[in-house]
Amino acid sequence: MSDGRLHAMICGVVQGVGFRYFVVRLAHKLELTGWVRNAGYDKVETVAEGQKDALNAFLDELKVGPSSAHVKKVDVEWGKPTHEFDGFNVTYEEW
């Protein structure tokens, strides 16, 4: 399998519902690297790198989210991995 990079913007009821920590747990389970952060009102942004089959499974779960979330849409960009990440974490950088 080849590696890939996924950049996703998840929109809907995704803040204050544990969405970022859901993403971190999922990424660890799928052995992905990258980050997740809040990206303004009603948006969460994530970048993940890893095996393409794991990234596809990750995307499928992002479209659903945790039970307390309501995902309206997920915008996705695919790219080549940069291998810049050591793990997968919540980041608090400004958007």
Image: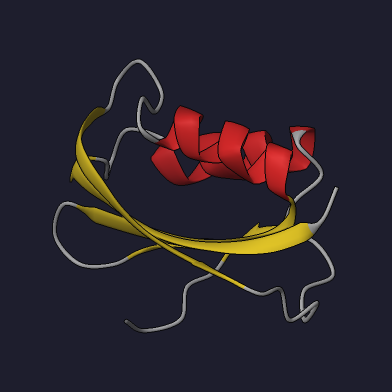
In the depicted structure, whether residue 26 falls above or below residue 11: above
Q: Is residue 72 above or below residue 6?
A: above
Query: Is residue 76 left or right of 26 when viewed as pictured?
Result: left
User: Residue 82 or 93: which is nearer the viewer?
Assistant: 82
Left or right for 10, reference 30: left
Lateral position of residue 42 relative to residue 46, left or right: left
Residue occupying the point 58% across, 39% down: 56
Percent x, y for residue 62?
43, 36
Residue drawn at (20%, 42%) of the image: 73
In the rendered image, is residue 35 in sight? Answer: no
User: Residue, x 23% and y 56% (percent of image)?
Assistant: 43
Examine the rendering and report whether any part of residue 2 can be seen: yes
Depth check, front residue: 11 or 20: 11
Q: Is 74 placed above or below 47 here?
A: above
Residue 24, horizontal then vertical, whole percent: 62, 45
**Residue that protrudes farthest toward the top in the picture:** 67
